[in-house]
Image: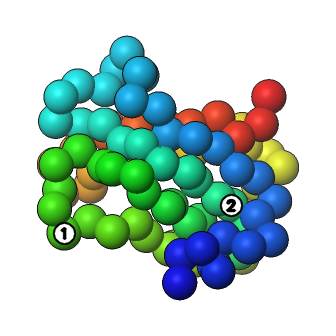
Amino acid sequence: MLNAQAQGAVFKAELSLELRVSDFLHWGAGEVNLTDSKFVHEPRRVAEVKTFDGFNLELAEDIDLTRYNAVVIWCEAFGEFISAARFRD
């Protein structure tokens, strides 16, 4: 399902394990796909969360992706940075 949702992505980015602000508990890996209306993550692995299998989020209609150049993955529950990826220069 995630692969189908990622079709037609306007932007793509790769989450890297090598971010210097990530640590052994807070990191991510995998491809991030942004369509006009969705944010889709196709995971390879995201930390040691065993129940996590990627995500597919609807973007608010007023989000204009051309105004941004990166995505940030943030854990609201614990207030922790997880990962980030640049999708445009």
Instruction: Name the image quarter holding the C terminus.
Output: top right
The residue that mark 1 highlights is 51
Numbered mark located on residue 78 in the image? none
On screen, 57 above or below 9?
below
On screen, 14 above or below 4?
above
Position of 49 with respect to 39 (left or right) is: left
Amino acid type at circle 1 is Thr
Residue at image coords 23%, 44%: 47
Q: Position of residue 66 (x, y in %)?
A: 83, 49
Q: SS of the residue at dot 2?
A: strand
Residue at image coords 53%, 84%: 1
Amino acid type at circle 2 is Leu
Between disc 2 and disc 1, the foreground one is 1
How many numbered marks, from 0 up?
Answer: 2
Residue at image coords 64%, 35%: 86
The residue that mark 2 highlights is 34
Q: SS of the residue at dot 1?
A: loop
Residues under numbered marks 2 and 1 in contact, where contact means CB atoms less than 8 Å apart? no
The alpha-carbon separation of the residues under discs 2 and 1 comes to 23 Å
Q: Position of residue 67 (x, y in %)?
A: 79, 46
Q: Position of residue 37 (x, y in %)?
A: 71, 75
Q: Nearer the viewer, residue 80 or 4?
A: 4
Colour scheme of the picture: rainbow
- Is residue 55 visible from the viewing direction of this image? yes
Position of 16 with respect to 39 (left or right) is: left
N-terminal of the two: label 2 or label 1? 2
Quadrant position of residue 87: top right
Q: Residue furthest top?
A: 20
Q: Nearer the viewer, residue 85 or 81?
A: 85
